[in-house]
Structures are given as structure tokens and as C-alpha cells.
Amino acid sequence: MEQYDIMVVGAGSAGLCAALQASYVLGGHRVCLVEKNGMCGGTTTVGGVNFPGIFHVWGRQVIAGIGWELVEQTRRESGKPLPDYLCEYPMAHRHPEYQISIDAVVFACLADERLKAAETVVKFHTMIGAVRECGDSNLVTLCGKDGLYDVAAKVLIDCTGDANLSKLAGAKLNVMDECQPGTFSCYAMGYDYESLDMEELQKNFEKAVEAGEVTYDDLGWNRAFTPAFLKKHGHNSNHITGINAADSVGRTRMEMAGRASLMRLFRFLKKQKGFENLEFKLASSECGVRESRTVQGLQTITVNDYVDGRVFDNAVCYSYYPVDLHDAKQGLVNRKIQPGHVPTVPLGALIPKGLSNFMVAGRILSSDRLANSALRIQATCMATGQAAGAAAALAIKHHCEPADVDLDELRRILQENHAIVPPRE
Ligand SMILES: Cc1cc2nc3c(=O)[nH]c(=O)nc-3n(C[C@H](O)[C@H](O)[C@H](O)COP(=O)(O)OP(=O)(O)OC[C@H]3O[C@@H](n4cnc5c(N)ncnc54)[C@H](O)[C@@H]3O)c2cc1C
């Protein structure tokens, strides 16, 4: 049977950084990265959200390390220098402009290169089927293209975005009654925005809504026909509401509802003047999921911790994004962070209660709903992934639980790998 020290499940922004960091400490042959898709990046690549943020705020960089280096390399190799306002104080632009738009294909290729160089054992097209404890290890049943097989791993890190591994291991989870909407990104091409008759389009759109041909959600928030979709040529616009996509049943509903939404819009636009040559091109192969489940951890980050910029004693990284809950009923719920403050993530938010040798990273970390709406952002997912990878590797080295690793040693390893760790107060 294959045996590893660490198994990371999910190669999104969190899992990729967790696997690389663990490989840098232990050697890649001791680390296995399991991913259901055929490429790394998760929501960043296959979900079409290829604009990770936020790494800089209040005039300084607050998140660096493995994820940032990949983002920076992606921009460099694409011939796109980083914007020079990133470290400006006071912030000269709105927060979305501090996100870094990257080429998803280049990012995924560079991720492969780094995993290969680190000799991490990568298993694409593989899902998890069961987890059980076995002595001081965990047995994980994986499902590859040829069927089921067991793999042993001492420490598990759940980076699935939906807490799939945590659920199999029996973790306590927070499941949302009604999740924030998903978004199926696509590019709309073949029309000239400047020559469109927006008044006419608005009128026709209202009529089509009344006739049940399209819905307002097909375009996103606005209750009126919004030119944003057309001006941006599609992209991160529509809203797929009322579905929790944590499991395969939910995912299937979400994907099909997402494509149905795109098709309604396509049929509507094709009938409008100026759209005779309209084409929809895939910006993502999957629906982007904003929210499904989080774990109940040893520590839970609350929205007040977040907006007050609480610095936890055992903080492993910073995080910055305004509270950004896309609530289907209330609209966008925003709360700003106190100027000059930068929230932090404690180690305990990455460790589910009641599980041994188990960590999580990325958007499923232990947090209340409003705090999570900010913590789910990619730069934070990358930083929590790197921190979880380092803590898991230290737990292996010292034969202890991830919760008991020496915080100074953890900080040192993270800093040696160029991460920014909040100072202990
Ligand atoms: C529409 C939308 C807009 C957003 N806007 C922004 C933004 O502007 N800026 C920003 O930084 N962030 C944004 N986000 C949030 C951010 O993109 C995500 O929260 C973040 O990428 C999640 O990273 P993750 O690594 O936790 O999970 P994911 O990216 O979801 O990665 C999880 C990985 O695990 C794999 N996986 C899942 N289940 C299994 C399984 N059972 N077995 C094996 N593999 C599995 C998946 O294939 C995937 O690769 C947005 C999200 C959405 C949906």
C-alpha cells in the first residue's frame, strides 16, 4: 500500500500551497496531493475566478509566500508587470483593483512545474471515498479511473472547498441554510458594445423577464438590465441561487442551473440587434461556488474579530477583504475593516474539533458566516494553505498533533518560505 506522511485533498489555491509547503519541509515523495480535476487551481482556474486578492493593503504587502510567488511569476511570464499602486497609502483605488488578474492556463502550468520540482506525488482525476483511522495513521480510500484503492497517510489536510474530507472523517460542520449564489463565468464575444441601443435592450429584457424567457439572476444583482455584463463581455456576472453545492448532487444541480442560465441569456441576446455574431466562450469549466460548508474548529474567527483586525496570539497569517456576503435576499452585505487594521487567522481555525492529525485550509476554515465571506478570498486561501502545510510537516517531524507544534518554529519555517507571519503581541 502507498504510504505518505501528509495527504492534501484538493489542489485549489489552498491545497496547492499546502502540498508545496509540506513538500519543501519533508520532501515531496512523502506528500500526496489528490485532486478530482486534471489541473491545479480550483476556483482560480477551472472556476474562472482568475483574479486572486488581496495581497496588499494600507501601503504594504500582508500576504506573500508560495501563492504570491506563483501569482507574481504568472504575471512576469505573461509579460504583464504588476500595477505600481499596490503599496500606495492611502489606498488610491477601490479594493477589487488590488486583486491581480492572471492567466489561468499559465498559472496551472506553473503549478505543475513547481509540484514536479518539489517531487510531490500528484494524483489528478482522483476523488476520496472513505477515511478511517488505523493505528497512528489514516487510511483513505481513493477512487481513481481504474477503481478504488487504499492509501495510508499520517496527517490529512482538507482543502476541498466543500469540507468533503472533513465530512467523511466525522468533523462537525456548519452547513448554510441558504448559500450565497454561485456564478458560471463565460466570455461573450462577437458584438460591438459602443454601438448597442441600451434603451431598446432594457425594454426587451424586461419583456423577456415577464415572459419567463430570462431571469434577473441571469445577469447578477441588478433588477434592471445591466450593461455591466455586456461591457465586460460576460465574465463573473450571473447568479445561480438556492443551491448548496457541497456534494455531487448539489454540484450537478449547480452546474446544470448555471449552464441553463447562460443558455437563457444566449437565446435572448441572439434575438437582439447587434448580436447576430454573438458567441459564448468558456471562461470556466465549472460553476464557481462561493459558499457551501465550513468546519467547526478549535478556534472560530468571528466577524468582529475580522473587522476589528484582531491579532491572535497564535496567528499564522494575515487576511484582508471587506466583508462581502452575496445574500440572495438582502443583496450585498458589506462591512469595512477599520483603517490601518489587518485581520489574522489563528492556527486553531485550521484544526477541526475532535479530529486527530487533521487540518483544513482555504475557504472551509472555522469562521462565522460574515467573517467567512471575507476569509474565502484567494490570497487568504493561499496563506492558510501554506500555514497548514508547514504545521502538518512539523507535526510529523515532532510526532505531535498539529495543534501542539511549536509556534516559533512554525513561524520560522513560514518566514523561510517567504510567508508574512503576524508578530506575536
Ligand atoms: C464567483 C466568485 C467570485 C469570487 N471573487 C473573488 C475575487 O474577486 N477575489 C478572490 O481572491 N476570490 C474570489 N472568490 C473566492 C475564491 O475564488 C474562493 O473562495 C477560493 O478560490 C477557494 O479556494 P480553495 O482552495 O479553498 O477551494 P477551491 O478553489 O474550491 O479548490 C478546491 C479543490 O478541491 C478539489 N476537490 C473538491 N472536492 C474534491 C474531492 N471530493 N476529491 C478530490 N478533489 C476535490 C476541487 O476540484 C478544487 O480543485 C470568488 C469566488 C467565486 C465563486
Image (cartoon, rainbow, N blue to C red):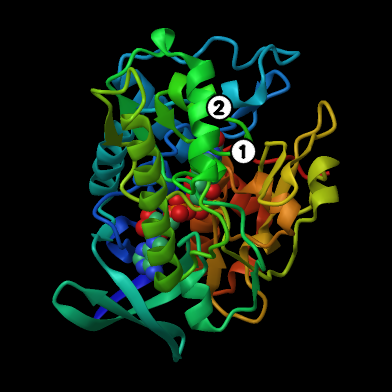
Q: Residue at x 74, y 51 (%)?
A: 370
* Mark 1 neighbour density, 10 Å: few (under 14) some (14–19) many (20 or more): some
Q: Given the image, on which type of amino acid does mark 1 rest?
A: Trp
Image quarter in which the C terminus is found = top right
Q: Which quarter of the figure has residue 111? A: top left
Tell whether label 2 touches label 1 (CB within 8 Å).
Answer: yes
Answer with left or right where residue 255 lies relative to residue 60.
left
How crowded pointer 2 is (Cα within 10 Å; few <14, some 14-19, many 20+) is rated as some
Q: Is mark 2 within 8 Å of ligand 1?
A: no
Q: Position of residue 176 (x, y in %)?
A: 65, 66
Q: Residue at x 42, y 45 (%)?
A: 184
Q: Is residue 20 above or below residue 366?
A: above
Query: What x and y, as percent, mark residue 45?
Result: 36, 42
Q: Position of residue 376 (x, y in %)?
A: 60, 48
| Left or right of residue 369, residue 19 in this image | left
Residue 405 lies left or right of residue 155; in this view the side is right
Tell me the element at label 1. loop
Q: CA distance from mark 1 to mark 2?
A: 9 Å
Res 104 label:
none
Give the number of the disc on residue 226. Answer: 2
What's under tag 2, amino acid-wise? Thr
Q: Residue at x 61, y 38 (%)?
A: 221
- Label placed on residue 221: 1
Q: Which structural element holds mark 2?
A: loop
Q: To which quarter of the image does residue 99 belong? A: top right
Is residue 65 visible in the rendered structure shown here? no
**Measured along the vertical axis of the image, is residue 257 above or below residue 64?**
below
Quarter that holds the N terminus: bottom left
